[in-house]
Image: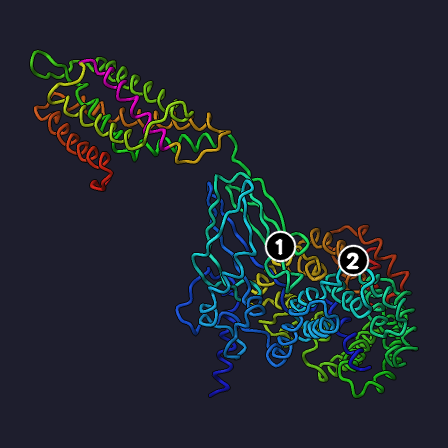
Amino acid sequence: MIARIAFALAALLISTGAFAHKPSDSYLVLRVDGAKIDGRWDIAVRDLDAVFDLDRNGDGRVDWGELRTRAGEVDAYAAPRLALAASGSACPLRVVDHEVERHSDGGYLVLDFRAECASRIDAIDIDYSLLFDIDAQHRGLLKLDSGSVVSAVFAATHRRQSFALALPSPLTQLRGYVADGIEHIATGFDHLLFLVALLLPSVLVRRGGHWEPVDRFPTVLRSVAGTVTAFTLAHSITLSLATLSIVSLPSRLVESAIALSVLLTAIDNVWPILPRRRWQVAFAFGLLHGFGFASVLADLDLPPASLALSLFGFNVGVEIGQLAFVLVLVPLAYLVRDSRFYPRVGVSAAIAIVAGGWLIERSFDLRLMPF
Amino acid sequence: MRVALLLFSSVFASLVAPCAALAAPHRPASDDEIVETLPAGARQSDRATRALRAATARDPANLDLALRLATLDVARARRDADPRPLGRAQATLAPWWNAADAPVPVLVLRATIEQSGHAFEAAAADLERALAREPGNAQARLTLASVRQVTGDLDGAIESCRQLVDVASTALAHTCEASVDAISGNAALAYDSLERAKATFARDTSLLVWATTLQAESAERLGRIGDAERLYLASRALDPADVYTIAAYADFLLDAGRSAEVIAMIARDTPVDILLLRRVQAARRSGAADAAAESDELAQRFEALRTRGDRVHLREEARYTLDVLGRPAEALALALENWRVQKEPLDARIVLEAALAAERPDAAREIVAWIDRTHLEGERIAALAEAAR
């Protein structure tokens, strides 16, 4: 009788909320980026102890050695209890590292993991079933970060939840694509060197058998504007055709041809081999470079819905980057055009050497050049 | 030397512990680094519990095994002041958890777990179902009395206590009744009744502690401050670790303006939230240097509970918000939300205090009416009710 009543007393006192700890929680953070998910999962050591009996030496404490040596088993236990899926196909997850962390109620094992989905994630289905079989009051506390952060709680009665990822506003997206375009031109040495080679002679004029400086800056501007417009027009056409999958060329061929275009333009500055009208050269080779831009855009793994927006934004970014480069390059060239040391030949030769390297590298799929 | 070392390491631990909560994840440099200390009570009972758990896992439909394991876990939750074993007991009872016609012992365990999550209605329904099938179940009767008392159904609570006479000892029934009398205008009656009951409980410490603390609270309501203190100390001497008694005595000391004694009684690194709350209140009132750090620690614990969706600490959170953070409007909202679920004297008091501090005495009208109706005694609560009237 007394034992039963003592138990009843226990029941009485439980209702006073006199608890030392909070109940069992895990902390799950998912960062979604394109088709990839970067995850961090903090699981209480006390909960893992209930599953794995971690305290092997029985000293009432779990040390890193006791935890580390069982980490593989923990992964094998935890991973199947977190099913991630996008567009109906599973995104298998892989634990890449283990750390430890303290939360307000004690020590946690941190599983750092990655998950790969088949395609870009627009919505994610999460099926969480960790520990519910041994602790019905366990909760999985989720923070889902896809630009904006969403919080959710998984419980034994609420294991499966789906989240449509908040797409950034069209303006934010557009800004992102413009930035991608600028970045691509700023780090695309082949395009930049092509522009240098193309515009190097624009401050000079060929009279008879030799080059002379142009007299007036407006003359330079006119010819540069014509050349740049032709280049822009041409690469916009092929960028659109390729992105809309109307024309597609093998990437190795395109990249090799771009290298060849740089090489030929540089050689032309020393020994004329191309048409005299610069805009024609710019247009013809611009068509090639557009295919190059398109492969970058394809790598960004765009959702079909925002294709038009991304195409436009990326192109605008490329033009902005290109224009900024030209605005620095041309006045500089104009200022030093009179000098006997105007580096038409030297720079062209250097560009030709680099472009030759690229041509060999890209044609034969080698790895020679540092950039 | 050893004493000095122990002293040093415990001081060091108490200094380090709150900072550790903010540490970034890291990979320990050595295998010997301690990642977690398991609850002290866990070790001795663990082997038996683990064996039982393994047996239950092999045969989850075995009611007998499941009941033994769940009962062990519920008792352990009480002993370690740890809610985790309650979740484990619930998982053990999963095959019967959603069945309205579950066996009586399952109903009683389920009610115990439900009320710990403040699901009082579900708990009462389960207990009534259990008693309909087994009227002689003393445990169900006593638990039902407690659930009714917590939710403010004092008549129902008294009725449950009286029915205990037939199925348990008279002293137990009287103590149960006294716990209701003490908060319904009969504190003097309760005090005397508890004095008699104590003589019968002489050999059972947990019952004796229960009766003694109840008697101390009754004395406090009657304004017999000297008796109250003597009884609190007597109860503390019987079981220095009893959380309910420490909390009640701390409230007594806080009301008497004796903050320093609260700080001395409750360790800084207490893992029990309701005790840390009292320590933080005392530290703030006495202007202790580390009040802010302790306060942050408590705020983190409330935040952690809120994040997981638990609303069981509303009473404490309301007190914290009012007394430590000094935000009466927020405290009032929390206190009123809590009042919808829990209706004990402390729940009434925090609504009154918050409503007065927020200059919204009308918000506490229901509480004033409740005090009138139940005849709850006590100078302090009477003064608060008068001010809010």
- Magenta residues, as a range? A276-296
Q: What residue did someone put label 2 on?
A: B341
Q: Nearer the viewer, residue B329 or B211?
A: B211
Residue B307, numbered circle: 1
Q: Position of residue A277 (x, y in %)?
A: 20, 13
The figure's colour scheme reads: rainbow
Q: Position of residue B235 (x, y in %)?
A: 74, 81
Q: Is residue A253 left or right of residue A29?
A: left
Residue B249 shows in the view: no
Does the stretch in magenta take in B15?
no
Tell me which residue sits at (86%, 66%) in the image. B376
Q: Amino acid at mark 2?
A: Val
Q: Quadrant of residue A97?
A: bottom left
What is the C-alpha distance between the residues marked 2 and 1?
A: 20 Å
Q: Nearer the viewer, residue A152 or A50?
A: A50
- Specify the subunit that label 1 lies on: B
Q: Position of residue B112 (x, y in %)?
A: 76, 67
- Specify the subunit that label 2 lies on: B
> Reading the chain from its start, which is encountered first: label 2 or label 1?
1
